Structures are given as structure tokens and as C-alpha cells.
Image (cartoon, grey):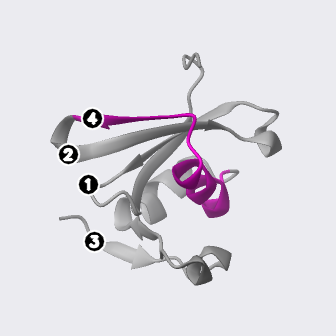
Amino acid sequence: MAERRLFAGAYQGMGMPFYFTEYFETEVLRKRPYLKREWCVTVVQKPLRCELQERNRFRFWAAVPQLGGRYLRVITLEDKVTIHNVFPDRGFRP
């Protein structure tokens, strides 16, 4: 299993902690520094769509107002609270 780190932000007190993999911290945020962890958590908590993908990971989509309403795709590990990847999904259609 990928290493995960606890996100000690505002969502910690909502009864469900969220984690981020080392890949997210070192690669995803380096490539897309404009993305915010809080946006990822919101997408997972209030998705427009959620799907199981290969290797027991899950995809979540939601529009993010701070990105002009563009859709983010957030990939989690099988526990649905460890965020592994995120990117704007230009091809997503609700």
C-alpha cells in the first residue's frame, strides 16, 4: 500500500480524517501547484459521480468554483479517504 500522510487541515474535525499519498505530496502538487488539498477533500465528500477503477481505486468528480467551475477528478485508494492523484478533467461530461 502506498505511504499516506494525515491532512491536519480543517476537515480533520469532521469525523473522517483524509490522507494523502507520498506520490500526491511529491509529484502531483509539484506538477499542479495551483490545486488545493481542501478542494480534493470536497470533491470526495460531495462528488457529482464516483466510479471504481482498476487496482481497487476510486474516481470522484465534482465542479470546483475556484477553478471557474471546471471539473476535478480525484483518485483515492480503496479506503476512499487516501487521496492519490488529482487533475482537471477536461473530458468529463456530467
Residue 29 point in image, percent of width and height:
55, 56
**46 in relation to 1, above or below:** above
Residue 41, placed above or below residue 58: below
Q: Are marks 3 and 2 in contact (CB under 8 Å)?
A: no
Q: Position of residue 60 (x, y in %)?
A: 47, 40
Q: CA distance from mark 4 to mark 2?
A: 6 Å
Query: Alpha-carbon distance for marks 3 and 1?
Result: 13 Å
Label 1 is placed on what type of residue?
Answer: Glu
Look at 60% across and 21% down and name the residue there.
90
Residue at horizontal 65 percent and vertical 62 percent from the top = 38
Q: Distance between the Cα atoms at labels 3 and 2?
A: 16 Å
- Which numbered disc covers residue 56? 2
Between disc 3 and disc 2, the foreground one is 2
Q: Label 4 amino acid? A: Gln
73 relative position to 68: left or right = left
Q: Residue at x 17, y 42 (%)?
A: 55
Residue 27 sits in quarter: bottom left
Residue pointed to by mark 4: 53
Q: CA distance from mark 1 to mark 2?
A: 5 Å
Which one is earlier in the sequence, the residue at label 3 or at label 2? 3
Q: Quadrant of residue 9?
A: bottom right
Residue 78's tag is 1
- Looking at the rendering, the stretch of residues picked out in magenta corresponds to 35-53
Q: Disc number at residue 3?
A: 3
Q: Badge 3 local density, few (<14 within 10 Å), some, or many (20+)? A: few
Q: Nearer the viewer, mark 3 or mark 1?
A: 1
Return the x and y of residue 13 as percentages of the image width and height: 60, 83
Q: Residues within 10 Å of mark 4 (few under 14, many from 20)?
A: few
Q: Real-space Cα distance between discs 4 and 1?
A: 10 Å
- Look at the numbered discs 1 and 2 and tell me whether their residues touch, using CB distance below 8 Å: yes
Looking at the rendered structure, the kind of residue marked 3 is Glu
